Amino acid sequence: MKAETQGVNLDNVCEEQLPIPKHKLKGWTHFLGLYAGEHVAATEFVIGATFVALGATMTDILLGLLIGNILAVLSWTLITTPIAIETRLSLYTYLQKIAGSSMTTLYNWVNVIIFTVISAAMITVSATAVRFAFGIPAQLNWYPTNTWFVMVVVAVGIIVVLVAMYGFTAVSNFSRICAPWLFVMFVSGPLVLMPALAEHVIGATTLSSWADFMQIGSMSVWTGLDSEGKPGIGLLEVIGFAWAANTITHVGLIDMALLRYAKSRTYGLCTSSGMMFGHYIAWISAGIMGAGTAVIVQKSIVELDPGDVAFQALGLSGLVIVIVAGWTTANANLYRAGLAAQAIFKNHSRNRTTLVVGIVAVCIACFPFVFNQMLPLLTYAGLLVVPVGAIVFTEHFIFPRIGFTRYWAMFRNLTHSTPAVASWSLGLLFGFGLNALDVMSFYYLFIPTWFFTSVLYIVLAKYHGAAQKYPEEQAKLDAFDKHVEVHQAKQTQLAPDYVHDYSGMTKVLRFVSVSSLVITLVLALNTMFMSVGIPAYESNRELFFNIGFVCTIIYFTSAYWVMQRSKQVTESA
């Protein structure tokens, strides 16, 4: 099909430069799985242990993480999703219409670097599990000291790159398979290690009340004292970190790349699968697992890596969870990096750009210092992109309401938008200046930085042409958008319909996969509540390790089979 519109052959335009057509929109289950898979990452082991080392109290953790993660979900739902739904564009493409090519190119390079490094960190974390399984020594230096470790990183990285290359559907399908199993594993881990913690604190392997749980958590996990024995962070810091941990994707609008596929604004609430499970339950679970592992192996929690913690809590399934959780997060971030790179190199496909940045990510992942600096990386990366998110939000929502013209820079054929570049630069200076002056908690710096950049952009844009009207240019844009809509409507008619697979074999396979998860959870509950005394606990824990690993194999085999059968039914329809 050839579509000639306004002298432009849309068949020759890369699909990433056009709005997502209706037939490619995804259902809410895709986003539940995608966000659950991405935000239940191997770094949750690192972050969960960090809260312990920073000296948060148990009350601060339970309440602070709840509030902070609710704020994060609302940020996605009220800020990111509406812009993604109305434009159907990734931020990388949309920014071109607002800020011109010079700033967009610079910004895209920043995102390529950020998400490539984050992907590398996830690959490194996954490699720690494989390292543990093969007896490769822990990598404590900033550089690799073992050839086999490098080979493990390369092997793990190849899978991540291949999945990310296949695009959004492959990433979401992979996450949808992993998400239910990850949930069960992160719930089971604390249950399995709680008797060891209980025996260490109250002298018994079983808990008789909620008060016992609070006592164990307050005395052995979140004690309120940091690793040096000094009073630790408080409630506001916990709330701030939970909210700010993903500013790069919600307030920074990076997740327009994912949420442009959503059918409605309410799909922003699907991010709660990642926040309330991944960044609430998983962080709490990781803290308990880290403290329990520290008791068993007689080490400080800061000396443990994710592979150590996961193995002591879940056995061989724990090594799988570190690998899988690292993959699911690396996949989504490498997909974002590939999009940003493709926005720079428009003549190359997203597959090719993803492959290139993937190779770079694998090379970086060979250096263990990357995942050890994960928390500073996430926070500083968020502060870097928040001003750009403020600029885009302001032009999209505020400009029409105050009589300014949206896309004024594009209408003036500007390749360099001085207001956008100046606002971003001064926003960074403002944010990092507040940090240098230490006037407020670092975790909340994105809030004043966002408002400062927004107000500054309004003022500067007014004096560079945003307050003017461009009726001819607007009419041309409206006509082009209409042609794109017609072109995509024809594509939608040619697209095959999705057919649900209700066959008996598929129902059996689904039952098997769900049953394997239920058995795993029952075994974990048995380990916690039926372990009276150390001998019984060790026996139940070993039983969980053995049968739980068998259930893990059964789950992934049956879940993947279901997915493949669904594909075959749809393709044949």
Image: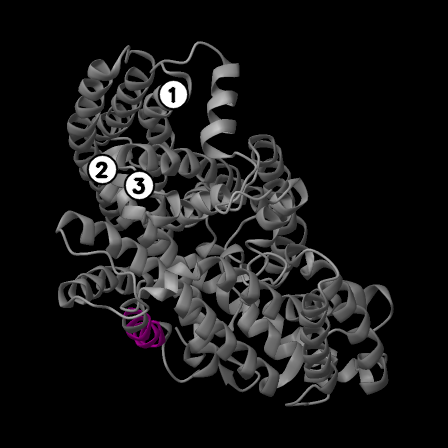
Rendering quarter of residue 99: bottom right
Rendering quarter of residue 485: bottom right
Discs 3, 1 touching: Cβ within 8 Å: no
Find numbered disc 2 in the image and state the secondary structure of the residue it sits on: helix
Q: Read off the magenta span.
A: 351-362
Which image quarter holds the N terminus? bottom left
* In this rendering, the label closer to the viewer, 3 or 2: 3
231 is within the stretch colored magenta: no
- Answer few, some or many: residues within 10 Å of disc 2's Cα (few below 14, many 20 plus, some between 14 and 19): many
Compute the Cα span from label 1 to label 2.
23 Å
**Residue 465 appears at what percent x and percent y?**
82, 85
> Which residue matches tag 1?
198
First along the sequence among labels 3 and 2: 3
Compute the Cα span from label 3 to label 2.
12 Å
Q: Is residue 157 left or right of residue 135?
A: right
352 is within the stretch colored magenta: yes
> Residue 317 has which mark?
2
Which residue type carries mark 3?
Val
On screen, residue 480 above or below 305: below
Q: Is residue 177 left or right of residue 65?
A: left
First along the sequence among labels 3 and 1: 1
Find numbered disc 3 in the image and state the secondary structure of the residue it sits on: helix
- Which residue occupies 81% across, 86% down? 464
- Which residue occupies 76% across, 84% down? 472
**Residue 453 appears at what percent x and percent y?**
75, 70
- What predominant SS class does the magenta segment belong to? helix
Discs 1, 2 touching: Cβ within 8 Å: no
On screen, residue 113 above or below 321: below
Discs 3, 2 touching: Cβ within 8 Å: no
> Which residue matches tag 3?
309
Q: Nearer the viewer, residue 436 or 168?
A: 436
- Which residue occupies 42% across, 69% down? 337
